[in-house]
Amino acid sequence: MHKRIYDDLPPELVKVKEAGFMVFDDGDYDLNIVGFRKLGDPDGFNQFNDRICIIYKLNQKWVVEEGAATTDAGRYWLTKADYKPCAIMFHPQQARGAYQLGLHGGKYEALRQWQPVKFWRDGNKDEHLNYEGEVFKDLIYLNIHRSSAREHGSLYVDKWSAGCQVWQNPKDHDRMIELCYKQIESLNYRTFTYTLLAEY
């Protein structure tokens, strides 16, 4: 992850506040996990062109750790003819306490959805992501996990997301898990909030 340190509120959390959402700062390692969906990028389909930031206070400083990710479903599930209309996580939203540490697909530790979140369903099977239509709210395991376990992850989203939020680099995912345990150790907070915003 790329790491930055601020004395004052980082610009990413300014955007969270401007959207009317909560900023968490109860103590060291009170995590703000924020996804930024890149809009207006004609070459962004099926790419890890979004970002996820994990922002927290440590020793009176704000720390921002950021990595490449996707907040969108990949080509495989979006266009698969015999698959249900694909989920696309709704933005803007703050899914308060909607995640806990758990297994993704029964295979490895990730942030697993355990409370309802908002999402759209895109069922026209083309390669255009539709951020519109009816908004659903349900528990469908839109987890926060990684792509391939290879050193730098996967080049394309493809099968890695059917609506989940997915880190490209497995090292960034591992750092997220490490920080989640630091929050538990520091504050005994065992649930995690995910905020999703759009940016251009």
Image (tube, helix red, strand yellow):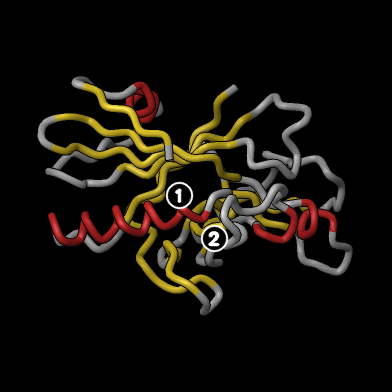
Q: Nearer the viewer, residue 190 or 179?
A: 179
Q: Amino acid at mark 2?
A: Leu
Task: From the viewer's perspective, tell me whether residue 173 is left or right of residue 169.
Answer: left
Q: Residue at x 43, y 40 (%)?
A: 1
Tell me the mark number nearer the camera, choosing from 1 and 2.
1
Q: Give the left or right position of residue 37, taking residue 40 as reference.
A: left
Question: Callout 2: few (<14), some (14-19), or many (20+) C-alpha neighbours within 10 Å?
Answer: many
Residue 12, by quadrant, is: top left
Q: Report the disc number at residue 172.
A: 1
Q: Horizontal and vertical percent for residue 14?
A: 33, 23
Instruction: Please name the residue that numbered disc 2 is placed on.
Output: 142
> Residue at the bottom extreme?
106
Q: Quadrant of residue 34?
A: top left
Q: Position of residue 149 (x, y in %)?
A: 57, 62
Q: Secondary structure at mark 2?
A: loop
Q: How far apart are the alpha carbons under marks 1 and 2?
A: 18 Å
Q: Amino acid at mark 1?
A: Asp
Q: Residue at x 60, y 57 (%)?
A: 147
Residue 162 placement (x, y as % from top left): 67, 59
Q: Nearer the viewer, residue 26 or 169?
A: 169
